[in-house]
């Protein structure tokens, strides 16, 4: 997670990909946001974004585990 989150910060990496076998194809495996987080990111408060970034790290770790099996 970045040390400081600004209003314009986005975890988007400009690579939108989904894996049908990972989290029911509801999480982008580029930025690890749920579809609803991607859609609503600009409307989210800084605290909501911070919470989402914590969730993103959890999903990223789960994806690494998923790929190893």
Image (cartoon, rainbow, N blue to C red):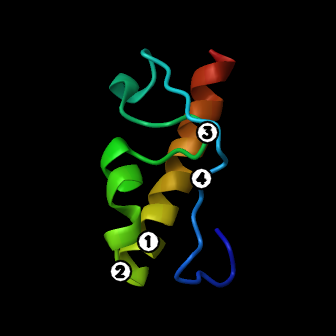
How far apart in space, not on screen, are marks 3 and 4 (Cα)?
A: 7 Å
Total numbered circles = 4
The residue indicated by pointer 3 is 30
Specify the quadrant that holds the C terminus.
top right
Give neighbour class at mark 1: few <14, some 14-19, many 20+ (Cα, 10 Å). Answer: many
Comparing labels 1 and 4, the label whose residue is closer to the camera = 4
How far apart in space, not on screen, are marks 1 and 4 (Cα)?
A: 13 Å
The residue indicated by pointer 2 is 45
How far apart in space, not on screen, are marks 3 and 2 (Cα)?
A: 22 Å
Q: Secondary structure at mark 1?
A: helix
Please name the residue shown 50% across and 64% down the image. Answer: 54
Instruction: Name which of mark 3 and mark 4 comes first in the sequence.
Output: 4
Please name the residue shown 45% across and 57% down the image. Answer: 55
Give neighbour class at mark 3: few <14, some 14-19, many 20+ (Cα, 10 Å). Answer: some
The residue indicated by pointer 4 is 12
Please name the residue shown 39% across and 25% down the image. Answer: 25
């Amino acid at each position: 997670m970045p040390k400081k989150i600004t209003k314009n910060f986005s975890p988007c990496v400009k690579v939108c990909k989904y894996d049908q076998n990972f989290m029911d194809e509801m999480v982008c495996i580029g930025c690890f946001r749920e579809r609803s987080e991607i859609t609503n990111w600009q409307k989210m408060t800084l605290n909501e974004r911070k919470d989402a970034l914590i969730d993103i790290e959890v999903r990223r770790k789960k994806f690494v585990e998923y790929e190893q099996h």
